[in-house]
Structure formats: C-alpha cells, structure tokens
Image: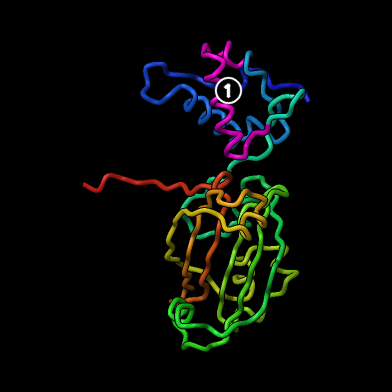
Amino acid sequence: MAAMAIDELGVTLNPTSPVPLYHQIADQLQTAIETGRLNKGDFLPSEVDLAERWSVSRPTARRAIQQLVDRGMLVRKRGVGTQVVASHVRRGVKLSSLYDDLASAGRRPTTTVIHLGTVEADDELATHLELPPGTVVTTIERVRYADDRPLAIMHNWVPHDIGEALTEERLADDGLYSLMRASGVRPLEATQVIESRVATDQEAEALNLEPGAPLLTIQRVLRDESGRKVEFARHAYDATQYSIETTVVEGG
C-alpha cells in the first residue's frame, strides 16, 4: 500500500506554543487516526519527508512517531515503513457497553468468555450488590478484543436471576447491557471509580503486554430503573489503547 500524501495528514504546528512540537504532531496524527483520515493499514511517509514537510528536525519527527508507536497505534516495519495498526479507543463518560462503543467507532469487537458460573457473595461483593452475604450470584470473566487485538479484561457479577438468562454464546456475540435490556432489565445509572496500575503477569499474558505495563481500571456499580443494583464490575484496559474522555465546566 502506498504511503499517504503528506498534505492529507492535516498537521499544523505552532512554534510559539509551550506544547513541544513533537507532542503537537503526535496529537494531530492520533486525531487523524481516530477520525478515519488515517486508517488501519495506511503507511506514513518517511521521517525525512515528514520532517521536511513540517519544517522540524528529523529527531522531532521521530519522537512524534515513537509516541504513537508506544501507544500501540503505529508500528515500524523494517524495510517497509511506519504503518497504522489500530486506533485508540477514546470513550466518553456515559452509560454504555464497551462492545457497543467499539462497534459505533467502526472497530470490530470480539469476545472470549473465560468463565461463566456462580459464586456465593462474600462480604465485599454482597455490599456492592446490596445482597445478604452468601447469596448466589452469577460471575462472568471475559477478554474483549478490538480488531483482533486484546483490549480489556472484564470481570462482572450480577444477581443470579439476571445471570440465568446469560450463556457463553450470547456473551461472546453481544454486550452485557444489550443482553440485560433484552431480558427486561433497564440500566439507568452507575457509580464508578477510575484508577491506574500496572499489569500482573496473568493480565499481561491475557492482553499480550509486558508484565508491569500500564493499565486503566474501572470499578463500577450499576443500578436499573427501579434502583436495584444489577451489576458490580471490575475492568482492566490496555492503557496504550484506551482512555476516558470527560467534559468539565467552570463551577463559578
């Protein structure tokens, strides 16, 4: 596949900005990937061509490209060039399933169900779901992929009457919230905690990462329209592919 024309990348730089030039380039290239102007499989021009077009040094162009390589969006292929391999998943703070968000973004979501079964709720889980300790709940563990690349490890616990309608086949083919809605459960609101940490050896293996790689984690408690707690979740995402986007306003 031929390299994309440099002028089509739409990169404009502000030399007087306090933001380093390499960071300005990297951010605009990421936007080009996320908006579809650069697609999976596209090749970038050479560093020499990019540096000349942007009137920057070759090390500046190289550092900008390396940022996106580190984020998992580009890959360098010796003798071939620099190629787009995946777009970063930027997810807004809204009540939606990762499966649906990936599909809406033009990514191909697939799922491997690691475990579907039942467990007696310990004190922590019982508190999160507002159930008596020892209550049987359904437990789910999955790995979610975007365009065949592992993105997230998802652990979910739901009341057993909800879990009875779930099967491995259905969980592999659809998002949990869609399956809930299909069975008459209407998710309404969630409280979640977003944190970061490093991957364990087991998580790194599942996500095809190096041990100690950065993860973004979300712990969530979901309520339905009646106010009942219908899900407790712990998800871990490959931080090089995933971010949370929020809008903030001045509070006066």
Q: Main secondary structure of the magenta part?
A: helix
Q: Position of residue 224 (x, y in %)?
A: 49, 73
Q: Is residue 62 magenta?
A: yes
Residue at image location 70% in from the left, 36% down from the top: 40
Colour mapping: rainbow
Residue at image location 44% in from the left, 56% down from the top: 195
Out of 72 and 181, give the one closest to the viewer: 72
150 up-or-down from 163: above or below:
above
Question: Does residue 228 show up?
Answer: no
* Secondary structure of the residue carrying numbered label 1: helix
Q: Name the residue at the left extreme.
A: 252
Q: Is residue 111 magenta?
A: no
What is the three-letter code of the residue carrying label 1?
A: Arg
Residue range of the region highlighted in magenta in the rendering: 49-75
Quarter in which the N terminus is drawn = top right
Count of number-bearing discs: 1
Task: Give the crowd class for mark 1: few <14, some 14-19, many >=20 residues within 10 Å.
Answer: some
Q: Position of residue 188 (x, y in %)?
A: 47, 68
Q: Which residue is mark 1?
A: 62
The quarter of the displayed image where residue 85 is located:
top right
Q: Position of residue 33 (x, y in %)?
A: 61, 34
Residue at image location 60% in from the left, 23% down from the top: 9
Question: Does residue 117 show up?
Answer: yes
> Would residue 226 appear left or right of 250 to someone viewing this image?
right
